[in-house]
Image (cartoon, rainbow, N blue to C red):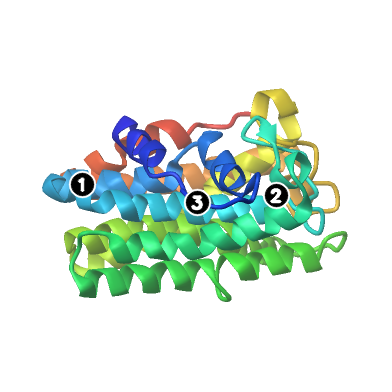
Amino acid sequence: MQRFENYLQSHLPHVATFHPVYEAALRDMLQAGGKRFRPMLLLGIVDAYEPLLYESALPVAMALEIFHTYSLIHDDLPAMDDAPLRRGHQTLHVRYDEATAVLVGDALNTDAFLHIVKAPLRSDIKVKLVEILASNGGSNGMVLGQAIDCYFENSHLTLEQVKILHTDKTAKLIAASMQMGAVIVGLDKSIVEALYRFGLDLGLLFQIQDDIIDETQSDEEAGKTTANDEGKNSFVTLLGLDGAINEADVLAKDIEVRFESFEPALKQALHPVMQTYLKRHHK
């Protein structure tokens, strides 16, 4: 992922303005690091099938990271999680002010689509990529999940409802990352659909692991505000820590079985992700 990191650092937002902090605020959370999970998924698939398209796919991977970063900035706002720490750094509304954080999130959301449009790919491919990101990140995807999360805070949802919440809020963008990589390299529709379904479950596992981290790690260990899920419909809140660990184990085993059924190139593409994120949880 060093190639992507170099690309990101050389393509940070640049705005010529007399505003004293706007450009710095646009860059802060992107430069603060992060797992780069979504770009890793997209670029892994591209590199495994069509390595000559890797450079052309970098702007799309950048778009995913920018879009994800916007979602984190808004998620941390006082009106939502009111979190002071993200990626080991002060959140933007703490470092600057709430208006700056809202506007930076708005700008990054829009800029994500600009990066896709400017990618050196065929126009029909770019239209499809925009459609995938908008469908999974907008009113029927991530934003819907965030709306459900906020509205039902301090209310008890069923396990099925919690899964729907986090599928929308987290898993759909992860699945979209895999789908977008598959579209760039022109994989068969059946493989694209299978990857999307796989990505939804991988994203759900990612969220359960995140809930477990919130319960078991300090702010310093996690690099973000933890112990902040009281009143939230997290898997730990609903199932307890042991129950959430068991849920993660069951889901991880199912994902591993499906992974083994993939063709060699796809297994090669997803191997780093499997190594990193399919860690077993034991009581």
Q: Distance between the Cα atoms at labels 2 and 3?
A: 44 Å
Q: Nearer the viewer, mark 2 or mark 3?
A: 3
* Marks 3,1: beta carbons within 8 A: no
Give how far across and how far down residue 138 sits, in percent.
54, 71
Residue type highlighted by circle 1 = Tyr
For label 1, the residue is 54
State which quarter of the image contains the C terminus. top right
Residue 133 is situated, as x and y percent measured from the top left of the image, at: 43, 66
In this rendering, which labeled residue sits more in front, label 3 or label 1?
A: 3
Disc 3 marks a residue whose amino acid type is: Ala
Instruction: Name the disc covering residue 253, or none.
Output: none
Residue 78 visible in the displayed image: yes
Residue picked out by circle 3 = 16
Residue at 36 percent across and 42 percent down: it is 40
Indicate left or right for 32 with 59 as reference: right
Q: Secondary structure at mark 2?
A: helix
Of 30 and 232, which appears nearest the observer?
30
Vertical order, 12 against 147 (above or below):
above
Quarter of image, res 2: top left
Label placed on residue 235: 2
Query: Which of the two labelled residues, at mark 2 and mark 3, occupies the earlier sequence position?
Result: 3
